[in-house]
Image (cartoon, grey):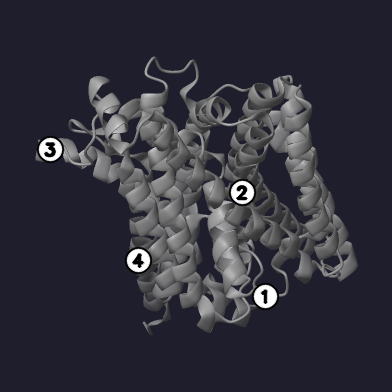
Amino acid sequence: MEPQLLLAFLVYLAILLSIGLLAHKRSTTASDFILGNRSLNFWVTALSAHASDMSSWLFMAYPMLIFSKGLSFAWVAIGLISGMWVNWHFVAPRLRRITEEQGSFTLSSFFESSVGDQGGKIRVLAAALSVLFLTHYLSAGLISMGLLFESLFHLNYYAGISIASAVVLAYTMYGGFVTVAWTDFFQGVFLLLMIVMVPLFATVTVGGFDTVIDAARIKHTYLSIFSDSIFENVEPILMGLAWGIGYLGMPHVLTKFMGIRDSNEMYKSKYVGITWQILALLAATFVGLSGISLFPEGLVNDELIFVEMVQSLFPTFIVGFILCGVIAATISTMDSQILVVSSVLSEDFYKKSWNKEASSEDELRFTRMAVLGVTLLALSIALKRDTSIADKVLYSWTGLGSSFGPLVLACLFCKRITSTAAISGMLVGSGMAMIWPHIEYIGSVNVPSMIVAFSCGLITILALSALTKRQVEDTKKPS
């Protein structure tokens, strides 16, 4: 192991733990721990929301798609930017205002209050789906950390994911929402600087932008987001749409909207966040393109393109410092997801089902124990190392987006959503997310799972709400 690499990592780790220790003083109640008492400014809200979204996918999975398959996969970036803009503009302000009026701290309790479910079925189902898909999402982050530590420090994969788990666990358990938000803010700034700098340096090193384009043409890489055939444009556009609408159901992003201090400042967060996202995804696209000229023979593992690029271009200490950007992207997603799942277990199971007389201190203690349990569960999934990072992220993204996205829209913009419709919509959406990958095609077009599952879930909610509402009205009519 290179001492300079280790030094860079330890410096970065010390910064994160320092933020955690400082923020720990502010989390004295469960409300503070779960949602930071809704105290974030618009800068922190914007960057923490976007940093918690991107994960190692930004450095590893997405550049791999551009590197191996060409610019047609830039539709993924276009879809993500469009989807997040819709989220900021239409969903975020309403969600912040309504959840404060309800006193809701989690997405599950927001659904329960919006629908008026007295039996707790919606809350339990939403919480269970959150745990299922977010722990798989967490395992993708751990896998990427294991691969990074293998490549960077020549550590055993299992040692790598164990170290990553311990780092995230340390400051998330003691600091809570405020710690997560402020570390995500710091990491959002840091990872943006790193991912912008590297492809610029790589392009200059290989001889300029023209050299990058020539290398891509020699490799017959597709350099346009549009195909010559209108029909061939359908699949990549659907793929971009699928990624974009997923934002509507991401609990670890939506809870950041709920934590802003003033909903009237949401528009400021929107512009800061979207600017950050455009720059980050544009830079990640150029990582993939410049990698074609830097590695004309390809790589053993295309998901390590950013890591290999940095190691080939920079001296050892700088390599360690830059690759902390990958660590930043991964940790900023993992900590938010761990906090969401532990909050769900505490707020929606422990407080409302298991121990209704629990004090705030009891709930805070349970939440911290849940952080430990969730981390260990994700670690056990990552130990299997059975699928790629891209596949795990796509599965989790589709599951969360199709389970919760339709119901978020319905609760915010429709009146009289019934509990039967809400439960059925979540079941249909999550079920189709699991089933559709085994079908994939409508005719000869490969339709992403998200589009099918999201559409089925939304139609189910609206149709059953209208039907069950009419049935209730009919029973009230005098005979």
* Residues at circles 4 and 3 in contact by the CB criterion of under 8 Å: no
Is there CB contact under 8 Å for labels 2 and 3? Answer: no
Q: Which mark is residue 38?
A: 1
Instruction: Give the structural element (helix, strand or loop) at label 3.
Output: helix
Mark 1 element type = loop
Q: Which residue is mark 4?
A: 467
Query: Residue 333 got which mark?
Result: 2
Q: Classify the position of the N terminus by image quarter.
A: top right
Question: Real-space Cα distance between discs 4 and 1?
Answer: 37 Å
- Which residue is label 3 attached to? 231
Disc 4 or 1, which lies upstream in sequence? 1
Q: Is disc 4 placed on a helix, strand or loop?
A: helix
Q: Are marks 4 and 1 in contact (CB under 8 Å)?
A: no
Which of labels 4 and 1 is toward the front?
Answer: 1
Task: Tell me residue 5's x, y (percent).
Answer: 72, 31
Gap between marks 2 and 3, in whole Å? 36 Å
Whether residue 166 appears in this view of the structure is yes
Of the residues under marks 2 and 4, which one precedes in the sequence? 2
Can you tell which of label 2 and label 4 is closer to the viewer? Answer: 2
Q: Can the viewer see residue 116 in this picture?
A: no
Using residue 73 as the reference point, say whether residue 353 is left or right of it. Answer: right
Q: Nearer the viewer, residue 401 or 124?
A: 401
What amino acid is found at the position of numbered circle 1 in the picture? Arg
Q: Are marks 2 and 4 in contact (CB under 8 Å)?
A: no
* Amino acid carrying mark 4 in the image: Leu
Kindly identify the residue that appears in the image at 74 percent across and 38 percent down.
Answer: 9
Query: Does residue 378 appear left or right of residue 201 in this picture?
Result: right
Q: Is residue 255 left or right of residue 230?
A: right
Across and down, in percent, residue 91 comes to 45, 70
Of the two numbered discs 2 and 3 in the rendering, the one whose residue sits closer to the viewer: 2
Q: Nearer the viewer, residue 293 or 449?
A: 293
